[in-house]
Amino acid sequence: MIHFPVLRDIRIENYQLYRNDNSSGIEHSLEGGVHLIVGINGLGKTTLLNAIYRLLVGPNDAPKGGEKSLGSSKNELTPWRRKKFFSSRVKDGALKATIEGKISFGDKSIKVKRKLSNLEVVGLSIDGEELDASQDMYEKTIEELSGLPSYVDFFSVVKFLIFFLEDRSDLIWDHMSQFEMFRILFFDREVAKASAKHRDDARSADSNYRNLLVSINKIKEQLEELTSDETDVTRQEYASALASLHGIEEQQRDLNEEFIEVEADADNSKLKIAKLKREFDEYKFGIEEKQHTLVSKHFPDLNDTVKILLSNLSAGGGCFVCGNESENISQTIKKALDNNCCPVCDSNENHQENSSKVIDNSELEEARLKKLQQESLLTLDSLELQQEILNDQLKNKAYLQELIAQISEERVKWLRKVQSIEKTLPEEGSSVEELAKQLRLLQGLLAQYNDTRRKETQAYKNALASQETNLHTKLELVKTKFEYYCSRLLVEKVMLRRDFIEGPLGQGGDEKVRLPFFKVYMTSGVHKESPELRESHEQVSESQREFIDLAFRLAIFDVVNGERNSPAMVVMETPEASLDSIFMHEISHLFRTFGEQNDGKNVFLASTNLNQSAMISSLLGIANEPVPLSQTRKDRIQGQPGKELKGNKHIPKLPQEDRDSHIINLLKLAAPNAALINHAEYYDTLFNNAVFPEQGS
């Protein structure tokens, strides 16, 4: 039984992007329904969605070539490629930043905590029971809780079905991605796992076959041109030495590339340290200036020399006379000024001849001074952390230099051996007998690869045949659900028709497989009578593209869950810029309908820009929405508008008192950028108008 992951709460701590004077992080619960991440450009909406994505999948990526199309590469994962995604966005490298979340699977839940710097698991529990905090344990537990064939398939479901981000691929327009999702979700679990292995093994054998065939053809060409000269050195020894040399040279290249990267990182760290030092000096100058102002306010009649002396002492700059830099001096000065005492002789105002000239402290200046001192300390902390990072990078650089020296010596050794063997080889060609023997061996191996390719393809076909009846039933349900969503929320008629991809699993071979997928048909202003085939997303509008692919995903969720009360989740970057007003309301109604399913436990999480559009109000159900219409075929042909859709479920708007709990407001939680600092009041007004329109502007 399959259970989709649903995020129930999230907490991000010690990440500078989400820290300001009033907030130290993000903490939000998602019990169900629509939840929004609201902000403006530059406040970290996309970063937050990526953090949630990485909380679920960890430091894993699809193999190169498989980032955009599911099933286009082997059923395996590779290490995270953008390892500096989170650390590069903040000054301190996110060394102390963590993300923690509770993820439910049906009636069970897992809690995981990761470092944002490298996504290492530092906390893990299931239903309150502590587990070994590791990525391996997380993957094993996720595989059990989800009921999916493998963790790789869990990753695929999260990336290609649940998350709908800017860099996504459209599931419905990719025929291979469609079928792979059907395999993962609609096949028997063991059959789904076995069929993925059969496919990978067939493709691997096919790749080996094609590569080996190239080598065989080259040997055949050599044999045709070869003279009768013999060699006293076996080709096997030469090939072995040459392979070793190539391996050493490959290691050398990798180490050199890693050294260049570490050196660049160290240079970047040095630049950051220089910037932080300059920033710290600026804060120190500001503190001295504020101290000078305070001294001037306390003793306005002092000459400039004495004022500068006292300001430098109180700012921690040390004594101009003896050079003493003790912190006790600045504390003594501050205490004296706070008590209206002379900072030189410690006399109170009753004994001061010029006591009438002492002016009370300025609370505003004191507050500004305290703010500067706090910012100075934060900058100093960042400076120390960055220095630690640089020290580690320099150690790594030295270690790599040592390894490069060792590998260079090893390369020289193997190069000399190869050159020594080459001197014994004949000037032209090679041994006919040796090459003929090698050719026979390779041809035997080629036959084995071909046999493996054929057998694995047949096993894949057998697995597919065993699931044919069940798959047919599930696909008919997907078609029905999809067309239901489209009929309720799209003016044009949209339908799916089954078709098949037929071909080898790899790039060659006689054995072919026949895989089902759906094609999209839709009416338009030109094709009113009957829906026309739409081969790709380029043949529909941006709004229609968004809705059609989302309706297909939600239809799959419905079919997998069936009659069970098993919640699901969709995470999306809302494309309000590409949606016209009608589609905006229609797609918002779709999301709210999804959130109401499974007793209101489904979660729809979306980021949205704070602008003049009605996207936020519409998603919360508080905007004025158009009446949904249903257009018959006769209406379409005659160009007549449809009639009001009967039985369309009304979803009540979110009460005012509950709206804050459904919004992650980055205006309040993120580190403010220049736009927010300059126009805070304007953005607050936009937010209130969108979320609480009843209160007026």
Image (tube, rainbow, N blue to C red):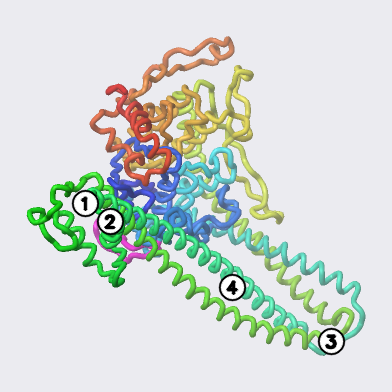
Quadrant of the rendered image containing residue 684 = top left
421 relative to 25, above or below: below
Q: Earlier in the sequence, mark 1 or mark 2?
A: 1
Residue 95 horizontal/vertical position (percent): 38, 62
Q: Which label sits in the foreground, 1 or 4?
A: 1
The residue that mark 1 highlights is 299
The residue that mark 3 highlights is 231
CA gap between label 1 and label 2 equals: 8 Å
The residue that mark 2 highlights is 307
Q: Amino acid at mark 3?
A: Thr
The crowd level at tag 1 (other Cα within 10 Å; few <14, some 14-19, many 20+) is many
* Frontmost residue, 696 versus 270: 270
Q: Earlier in the sequence, mark 2 or mark 3?
A: 3
Q: Earlier in the sequence, mark 4 or mark 3?
A: 3
Q: Amino acid at mark 2?
A: Lys
Q: Which label sits in the foreground, 3 or 1?
A: 1
